[in-house]
Image (spheres, helix red, strand yellow):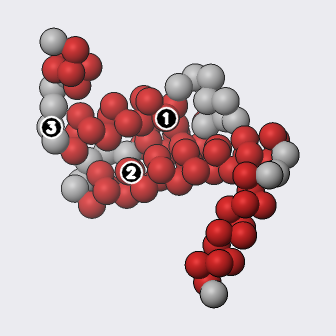
Amino acid sequence: MASLNKTKDLGLKLNSSIPLRKNLWQQTIQAKINNQAAVLKERNIAIQNMQHWAKQVTSGDTLNHEARAAAYYWKNLFDIEDLYKKTTG
């Protein structure tokens, strides 16, 4: 029964208005960044910038906070000096 309700809820969200979908996307990205920050905090890694980026995420993320947070997260999680250079050669 719970699975059916979740499927129904998902269907309602998919058929929702564009502003609602954008708002849900924004909330999802903010939660993602906050969860990444929590992992870093457990490892005693500074998270102030992650908290800032999470608060600044907008509907279209035109300032690319999600990407900034992801790069910071992976770099610090695995102590990678320059994530971009290592992935592009």
In the rendering, which numbered label is found on residue 37? 2
Q: Is residue 67 above or below residue 16?
A: above
Mark closer to the chain start, 3 or 2: 2
Residue type for callout 2? Ala
Secondary structure at badge 3 equals loop
Residue shown at 47% from the left, 50% from the top: 32
How would you rate the neighbour count of disc 2 (Cα within 10 Å): few for under 14, some for 14-19, many for 20 or more? many
Distance of mark 2 from mark 1, alpha carbons?
12 Å
Element class at badge 1: helix
Kindly identify which residue carries mark 3.
79
Q: In which quarter of the image is residue 22?
A: top right
Q: Name the side, left or right, on which 84 lies relative to 17.
A: left
Q: Is mark 2 on a helix, strand or loop?
A: helix
Single out the residue that lies furthest toward the right: 17
Looking at the image, is 6 positioned above or below residue 15? below
Report the Cα–Cα distance between label 3 and label 1. 19 Å
**Residue 58 location, x and y as percent?**
67, 35
Q: Looking at the rendered structure, which numbered label has been put on residue 66? A: 1
Q: Earlier in the sequence, mark 3 or mark 1?
A: 1
How far, Cα to Cα, is label 3 from label 2?
15 Å
Chain-order first, disc 2 or disc 1: 2
Tags 2 and 1 in contact by the CB under 8 Å rule? no
Circle 1 Cα neighbour tier, 10 Å, few/some/many (<14 / 14–19 / ≥20): many
Q: Quadrant of the C terminus?
A: top left
Residue drawn at (53%, 54%), measured in percent from left and top?
Answer: 31
Q: Foreground residue, 10 or 89?
A: 10
Label 3 neighbour load within 10 Å: few <14, some 14-19, many 20+: few
Tell which of 29 and 57 is nearer to you.
29
